[in-house]
Image (spheres, grey):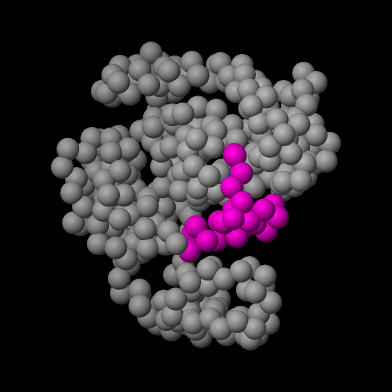
Amino acid sequence: MTISLLPDNPGAWTYRRFEDLYAIPREERETLQLEAVRINFAKLRNRIPGPQEAG
Amino acid sequence: MEAIDKLEDVLPVCFDHRVLKNYPIQIIENRDFAKLTGWLDKLTAHDLTRVDLTGVTTIEQWLRRLEAYGMLVTYSSGTTGKLSFVPRSYDELGPWKYHFFSVNRASSGVDPWTTKLPTFFPGYRGGYQTMLKMMSLFNVEMAGGEEHYHTLYDTHIPADLMALSGRLQAAEDKGEVMNLGLDPALLEQRQQMLAQGRSREGDMEAWFGKLIRDYRGQGVKIGGTFADVYRVARAGLDKGMTCEFAAERRPRGFCADTHRIGGPQPSAVPGAGSRDSYH
């Protein structure tokens, strides 16, 4: 990986230059994204009731 | 959903855009902001039960109160007849801003962190409609400050009017507007907005004509919805108007290359896009 990103704070990825972000190889990027989604899912799954109860 | 094994697994727990407007319309009509807050509370990880709603009687006030609490709730253009409310918060402001600045740099070649360009936006100013809120949050800074950010109008259409526009029109057609029990000030505001709509073409011509003169020789940025930007360009072309902004700092798009209003590549105008792209 050309730059080092942490999966627990994907919002911080936007602080990097988009040229550097686009340079991340697809396989590394998808691994990182999956880990970020997993962390967020675990963090939020019991905190947002969601659409099934909304309305 | 119990586990995420691959990226696609997250899709079922992502909100469909319709979720952002699946509140009963009676909540808006009755201005029941406790219920509206309760509905929104189910779409965010933030606890909205502690928002002080004392004295809130309009959607605009409700959105301001939420913002004071730390939320950044914006609403859609309401083209389906119902406003969507997007429950962002100030927690997301940093990434949102950096992303917006990056998109602008990628599309224009101008780095908004270091190069401030006077900006013309042929629309409204302020308020919580998503696109207008983004302009306030980001474009003003990118322009170099309020005095360098020029909008056609210094006001905006209140969310309350947007939310009830369909119902108001139907009531007006039947001559029953006064029966809706709305605040007379809101109805007066609606009349002013309708009058403003009728004079828009002339206002646009005067506004842009002045900017062309005032900013001759300077680098500028022009953005807005495609429809608005096209209208400005078309009106200018029809009158044979020309722009003479600085060539060396011009973003691609509007006025590029030809020095005429409506140069090539309008899609490259920073900030341009359909309203729905700003959800």
In this rendering, position of residue B129 left or right of residue B102: left
Q: Quadrant of residue B106?
A: bottom right
Q: Is residue B81 left or right of residue B33?
A: right
Q: Using the image as rendered, state which of residue A10 and residue B38 is in the foreground.
A: A10
Whether residue B81 is in magenta: the answer is no
Most extreme residue toward the right is B258
In the rendered structure, which segment of residues is drawn in magenta?
B95-119
Look at 18% across and 56% down and name the residue there.
B50
Let me know if residue B32 appears in the view: yes
Q: Position of residue B173 (x, y in %)?
A: 44, 17
Q: Is residue A17 above or below residue B243?
A: below
- Residue B141, x across and y down, in percent: 50, 47
* Residue at position x 80%, y 34% in the image: B259
Q: Position of residue B181 (x, y in %)?
A: 26, 23
Please determine whether, in this image, residue B63 is positioned above or below residue B153: below
Q: Which residue is at a point 41% across and 38% down the rendered structure image?
A: B127
Residue drawn at x 30%, y 43% as measured from the top left: B64
Instruction: Please give the count of numbered marks on the rendered protein.
Output: 0
The residue at the far left in this view is: B54
**Quadrant position of the N terminus of chain B in the picture:** bottom left
Q: Nearer the viewer, residue B249 or B177?
A: B249
